[in-house]
Image (spheres, rainbow, N blue to C red):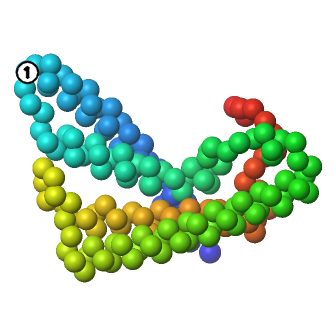
């Protein structure tokens, strides 16, 4: 079980690292694109396409790690005034709702991924890219997010701290 847990954490951290690398690539690609345009040249269509895909991927690849770190955005106005028993119930209820929504999105994402493979769909822009390359991240990321939210439903920790303000 320990190896499975370590493998799982390695997967989450690896996805987050890949998302971070893509974020750096976005910065580099935008700067290079601006420099190339200022030199009077036309940047490669690959720059534009890769930044579009990177924005999509970095969002979904980093999300499970972000849930694990409780780095999501939520309104603390209500959670900061609730007594601990009510906060516990509310937080676990919100987490359960998130598990259900992420589970549904993972299921629909898997359906879309399989449909893209079955139809051999392509994303047609500057290059022909198989659509399954885009949609494969849906079932993976949403399944991992459902698992992470599930930890807050049944685990010792709850999703919301009950404290207002930044905790840095």
- Position of 117 compared to 64: left or right? left
Horizontal and vertical percent position of residue 15: 44, 55
Outermost residue, bottom side = 118
Q: Is residue 29 visible?
A: yes
Question: At x 62% / y 75%, what residue is drawn?
Answer: 1
Horizontal and vertical percent position of residue 159: 72, 54
- Position of 80 compared to 30: left or right? right
**Quarter-wise, where is residue 68 in the image?**
bottom right
Determine whether 142 is above or below 77 in the image.
Answer: below
**Quarter-wise, where is residue 92 in the image?**
bottom right
Q: Is residue 3 visible?
A: no
Outermost residue, left side = 41
Q: Give 10 or 23, whichever is nearer the viewer.
A: 23
Determine whether 127 is above or below 140 in the image.
Answer: above
Q: Secondary structure at mark 1?
A: loop
Q: Residues within 10 Å of mark 1 (few under 14, many from 20)?
A: few
Horizontal and vertical percent position of residue 14: 45, 54
Question: At x 83% / y 41%, what residue is drawn?
Answer: 80
Question: At x 36% / y 45%, what residue is drawn?
Answer: 55
Horizontal and vertical percent position of residue 13: 50, 53
> Total marks drawn?
1
Quadrant position of the C terminus in the picture: top right
- Position of 41 compared to 159: left or right? left
Residue that label 1 marks: 40
Determine whether 66 is above or below 90 in the image.
Answer: above
């Amino acid at each position: 079980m320990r190896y499975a847990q370590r493998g799982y954490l390695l997967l989450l951290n690896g996805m987050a690292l890949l998302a971070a690398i893509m974020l750096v690539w976005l910065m580099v690609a935008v700067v290079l694109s601006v420099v190339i345009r200022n030199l009077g040249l036309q940047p490669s269509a690959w720059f534009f396409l890769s930044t579009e895909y990177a924005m999509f991927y970095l969002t979904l690849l980093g999300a499970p790690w972000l849930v694990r770190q409780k780095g999501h955005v939520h309104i603390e106005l209500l959670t900061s005034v609730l007594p601990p028993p009510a906060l516990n119930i509310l937080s676990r209820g919100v987490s359960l709702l998130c598990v259900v929504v992420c589970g549904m999105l993972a299921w629909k994402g898997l359906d879309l991924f399989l449909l893209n493979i079955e139809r051999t769909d392509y994303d047609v822009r500057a290059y022909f890219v198989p659509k399954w390359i885009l949609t494969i991240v849906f079932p993976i990321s949403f399944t991992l997010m459902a698992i992470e939210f599930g930890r807050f439903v049944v685990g010792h920790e709850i999703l919301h701290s009950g404290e207002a303000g930044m905790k840095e």
